[in-house]
Image (tube, rainbow, N blue to C red):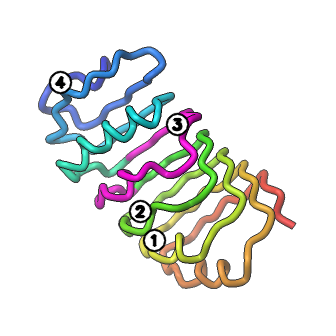
Amino acid sequence: MELCDQLEPVTSCELNCTYAEVNFNLYFKNMSIITLDGCETQVIDQFIGQSILFNIILYLAIYNSHDINDIPEGSSKISQVQWLDLSHNNIQQMNGLGENNAIRYLSLNYNQIDSIHEDTVANLTFLEQLHLEGNLIEHISNDLWSVFDKLEHLNFINLDNNSIK
């Protein structure tokens, strides 16, 4: 899809910033799926900022953006996001998810996360799957396991390829 096309019926957008000239005169009225691959933080923030206006994004994936050290601020403000995939970035902390409790699938595979704080996960009340494969996590506290137990929809946690002792 060429820069998400500017046609009204478009419901998904895949933007590879490595190959595309970024133009934000997009029509987000019916957009529900956004995938950003290799974009810089500034591009991601601008893209998400425009999509917040319509608040119907259900799937948001941001891959291979190596200058991203934190979860992009705007991603938590898109309150309808149910599938958030931020794999293959350099995210170090799981901060910035508190405002969005609609997330059902969260993937932070292959980042630089070394710990998970209980309060970060506790508000994700509809979370069904948590993917944290290939990070730097060394320990899961008993308090965090208790939070996981309280999330009644959570049925899958992937912590493979970490250094958990």
Residue ID for mark 3: 63
Disc 2 from disc 4: Cα separation: 28 Å
For image coordinates 59% across by 76% down, the residue present is 118
The quadrant in which the C terminus is found is bottom right
Residue ID for mark 1: 124
Q: Quadrant of residue 144?
A: bottom right
Disc 3 from disc 1: Cα separation: 22 Å
Residue ID for mark 2: 103
Q: Amino acid at mark 1?
A: Leu
Mark positioned earlier in the residue sequence (3 or 1)? 3
Q: Amino acid at mark 4?
A: Gln
On the image, the x and y values in percent for residue 17 come to 43, 23
Disc 3 from disc 2: Cα separation: 18 Å
Query: Residue 75 colored magenta?
Result: yes
Q: Is residue 42 left or right of residue 159?
A: left
Indicate whether 81 appears above or below 30.
below
Mark positioned earlier in the residue sequence (3 or 2)? 3
Q: Which mark is residue 6?
A: 4
Which contiguous range is marked in magenta?
60-82
